[in-house]
Image (cartoon, rainbow, N blue to C red):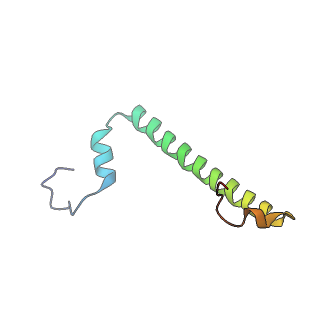
Amino acid sequence: MKPDSPRKKGFCFIDLFNRTFRHKRFYDLSLHLYNFVIHQVHLLDTLRSTLQQKLQTLPFADAFAGPLTNK
């Protein structure tokens, strides 16, 4: 899409991405890496919430209730 195109209204990340990474193999690799990172973030978030729930069920859960401080 040309920059002076009448259809162009505002900034579009996909257009910028397509103009920047024109080679299909690089685009596929970038998309795969992006999906991998998103998947890892989701797994870490799931792990964090699971661990948080497990810690709350322990008998000494009150020790983990507040922020950790050095005494």
In the rendered picture of this protein, how many numbered marks are placed on residues? 0
Residue lying at the far front in this picture: please name it.
71
Quarter residue 22 falls in: top left
Quarter residue 10 falls in: bottom left
Query: In the visual, does 16 lie left or right of 4?
Result: right
Along the line of sight, the residue nearer the viewer: 64 or 8: 64
Query: In the visual, does 11 lie left or right of 67?
Result: left
Quarter residue 25 falls in: top left
Estimate the x, y position of residue 9 in percent, counting from the top left.
Answer: 21, 63
- Residue at (64%, 51%) from the top-left corner? 44
Along the line of sight, the residue nearer the viewer: 41 or 26: 41
Q: Quadrant of the C terminus?
A: bottom right
Estimate the x, y position of residue 11 in percent, counting from the top left.
Answer: 25, 58
Estimate the x, y position of residue 28 in percent, counting from the top left.
Answer: 45, 38
Estimate the x, y position of residue 43 in percent, counting from the top left.
Answer: 65, 51
Residue lying at the far left in this picture: please name it.
4
- Residue at (70%, 53%) from the top-left corner? 47
- Residue at (64%, 57%) from the top-left corner? 69
Along the line of sight, the residue nearer the viewer: 57 or 13: 57
Residue lying at the far right in this picture: please name it.
59
- Residue at (15%, 56%) from the top-left corner? 5
Query: In the visual, does 45 lie left or right of 38?
Result: right
In this rendering, the answer to whether 70 lies above or below 34 is below
Query: In the visual, does 28 lie left or right of 41?
Result: left
In this rendering, the answer to whether 68 lies above or below 35 is below
